[in-house]
Structure formats: C-alpha cells, structure tokens
Image (cartoon, rainbow, N blue to C red):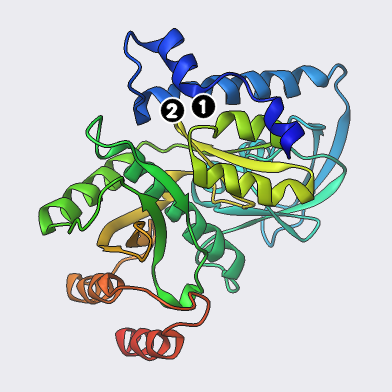
C-alpha cells in the first residue's frame, strides 16, 4: 500500500488551490471538481484502450419482445439495447440480468450474452430492490456532501448495506461537529435537496479503476482512503458517478435517479466516535402510498439504528411492515 500511496499526486489542498481558487481553504465543491477531473481522465484513458470495434451478439430473453442485437463489445450497454426495443424498457428498467448476473444498465457488455431487464414490480424483484436501496444511499451521500455549502467540510464515511426488511437506508458521515442535533427544518431541507437531485434523471455511471487512481481521487477523505486500502486485495476498485457525485461501491446500482419518487431524510443521530448516522426512506417511482402510511414509515426510519446492522430490529421491522401492508 505504501507503493500505491507513493503514486498519489501532491496533496489535494495544493492541487485545488492551484487549479480552482485563490484560497487554500478546501471545500466540498472544489474537491468535487477535482474528483471529476480524475474520473474523466481515467474514463477517457480506458475508452482509448478500445482501438478496434468488435461485435458481440446480445439475445434478449425477456418474457416480451424477444430479439437479437449486434452490439459493440466493451462499449454498448444494456441501456443501449433497451433503446432498440422500446421506450418502456429505458424508462422503467431498474437493472439488467446478463447471463443471469445482475448488471448495471450503463455497464458495458463484454461478450456474447443473454440479456433481460428487471423492474421493481417483477414477480421476483429482490435484486432490483437491493440495487434501489444502494442507489438511494448514494443519493443520500450526495445530498450530505452538498447540503452545507462551504460552511462545513463534510467527509462521507460509509453506507452500511442493511437488510431490505428494515425499510430504510443510511449513510455515516463526518460533519466536523460535536453534539449537533438536526432540527425538523434541517431534515425537511435535506429531503427537498434529495427530491431536487433525484428529479434530474441522472444515470448511475460505473467505472472500475486501479487502487492508485481511487487513492488519488479520494485523497482528501480519510474514510474513503481506508476503504480503498481494504479493497486492494480485489485488485480493482469500483466507482459510481451520479451527476458530479462520485463514491465507492461494488454495486450494481439502479439505472437512474428518477426511478425514485418520494424521499425523506428521517433522522440524524450522533454515533460514538463523532460520526453521524443519516437515516432515510424512499419509494420507487411507480409505487404509491397513502400519506398516513408514508408518515408511519418515516417515523419508523427516524428511530436511531444502532448495534449489529445486519440483524438489529429485524423481527420488529418485519412485524411493522406486515401491519403497514394490512
């Protein structure tokens, strides 16, 4: 890892100062521009590796609209295939299955394959639901990085992946504050920011990079640096970009941000050690709930989530979910 760190460019404080502003004060906005420069640079480099177009055969095996498409290897994505079928597939598909493997809609196809598309209302929506909650956590992270403008420098820590039955998603963040309590107005403002963000119809763009690239990109964030170091054993680090927000995750993610309908930041609670756990709940775009039911879901998601996140409160969550559905 020391060798990887030696490959990192000079400190972000110096680079941001030199390229973007006349002050040494680092802000989330400036760091975002810096990250996107590196992301675009690496994306262009990888695209440049594809010197010769190779064709692959993609067979759509969904229950409707079967067909075969000749696409470009390492360039064409499931979304491009969906464009050849109908607008319904591009508008409502949350995830793809490529040779039976869950696959991002914007992830390039690498070989001849069988392809199908997943929606939230499918008979077995488990993989689509998992991608949905991951993606909502990514949106939540983007909200927290931008919500405080230049007042605080926010460092995202991690977005623990919870069992779907909990009915919420979370992101642990370092606000650089102690003993801060979010007001109802704070939560309302964050929720409105999330709704504005998801309405921009932004795709979730995937890019696999060498750990040294990820270390450069996240050199301003001690928590992401640690996460990259933990992932080095796998050889590659997977990044996702939504708009200008970039994060680390294995994925897959859903197709685009507009697949979210309702989105509420339900609570923010300080954790031992100084981090804050931001808890939120969201509803897919083609689902509808009565306000009273939605308010109950928000109230449940506002309760501080502590302990073993894989199991804590699972039975209570299941009982509550069943009562809401009754």
Q: Nearer the viewer, residue 11 or 64?
A: 11
Secondary structure at numbered mark 2: helix
Residue 199 showing in the rendered view? no
In x, y percent, where is residue 192? 22, 47
The quarter of the picture where residue 213 lies is: top right
Give the label on residue 32, or none. Answer: 2
In x, y percent, where is residue 102? 69, 57
Q: Residues within 10 Å of mark 2 (few under 14, many from 20)?
A: some
Secondary structure at numbered mark 1: helix
In x, y percent, where is residue 10? 57, 18
Write the residue at 47% across / 61% down: 133
Q: Nearer the viewer, residue 290 or 267?
A: 267
Q: Which quadrant: the C terminus?
A: bottom left
Taking the image as shown, residue 195 lies to the left or right of residue 216, namely left
Counting the numbered discs, the total is 2
Judge whether 192 appears above or below 317 on screen.
above
Q: CA distance from mark 1 to mark 2?
A: 5 Å
Quickly name the residue at label 1: 35
Q: Nearer the viewer, residue 121 or 21?
A: 21
Write the residue at 59% across / 22% down: 38
The quarter of the picture where residue 273 lies is: bottom left
Judge whether 108 appears above or below 113 on screen.
above
Taking the image as shown, residue 320 lies to the left or right of residue 13, namely left
Q: Residues within 10 Å of mark 1 (few under 14, many from 20)?
A: many
Q: Residue pushed farthest front?
A: 2
Task: Check if mark 1's residue and mark 2's residue have beta carbons within 8 Å.
Answer: yes
Q: Nearer the viewer, residue 308 or 143?
A: 308
Judge whether 46 appears above or below 281 on screen.
above
Taking the image as shown, residue 213 lies to the left or right of residue 220, namely right
């Amino acid at each position: 890892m020391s060798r990887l760190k030696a490959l990192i460019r000079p400190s972000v404080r110096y680079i941001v100062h030199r390229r973007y502003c006349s002050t040494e004060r680092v802000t989330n906005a400036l760091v975002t521009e810096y990250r996107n420069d590196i992301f675009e640079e690496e994306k262009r480099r990888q695209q440049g590796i594809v010197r010769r177009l190779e064709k692959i055969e993609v067979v759509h095996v969904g229950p409707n609209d079967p067909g075969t498409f000749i696409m470009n290897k390492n360039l064409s994505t499931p979304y491009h295939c969906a464009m050849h079928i109908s607008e319904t597939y591009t508008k409502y598909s949350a995830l793809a299955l490529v040779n039976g493997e869950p696959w991002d809609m914007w992830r390039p196809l690498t070989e001849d394959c069988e392809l199908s598309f997943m929606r939230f209302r499918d008979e077995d929506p488990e993989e689509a639901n998992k991608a949905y909650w991951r993606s909502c956590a990514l949106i939540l992270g983007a909200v927290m990085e931008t919500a405080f403008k230049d007042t605080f420098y926010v460092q995202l820590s991690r977005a623990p992946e919870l069992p779907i039955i909990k009915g919420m998603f979370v992101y642990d963040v370092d606000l650089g504050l102690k003993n801060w309590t979010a007001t109802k107005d704070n939560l309302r403002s964050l929720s409105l920011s999330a709704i504005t963000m998801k309405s921009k119809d932004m795709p979730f763009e995937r890019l696999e990079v060498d750990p040294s690239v990820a270390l450069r990109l996240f050199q301003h964030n001690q928590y992401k640096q640690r996460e990259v170091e933990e992932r080095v054993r796998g050889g590659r680090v997977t990044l996702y970009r939504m708009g200008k927000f970039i994060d680390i995750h294995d994925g897959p993610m859903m197709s685009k941000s507009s697949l979210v309908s309702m989105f509420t930041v339900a609570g923010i609670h300080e954790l031992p050690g100084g981090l804050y756990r931001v808890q939120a709940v969201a509803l897919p775009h083609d689902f509808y709930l009565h306000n009273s039911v939605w308010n109950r879901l928000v109230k449940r998601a506002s309760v501080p989530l502590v302990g073993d996140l894989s199991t804590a409160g699972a039975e209570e969550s299941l009982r509550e979910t069943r009562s809401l559905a009754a």
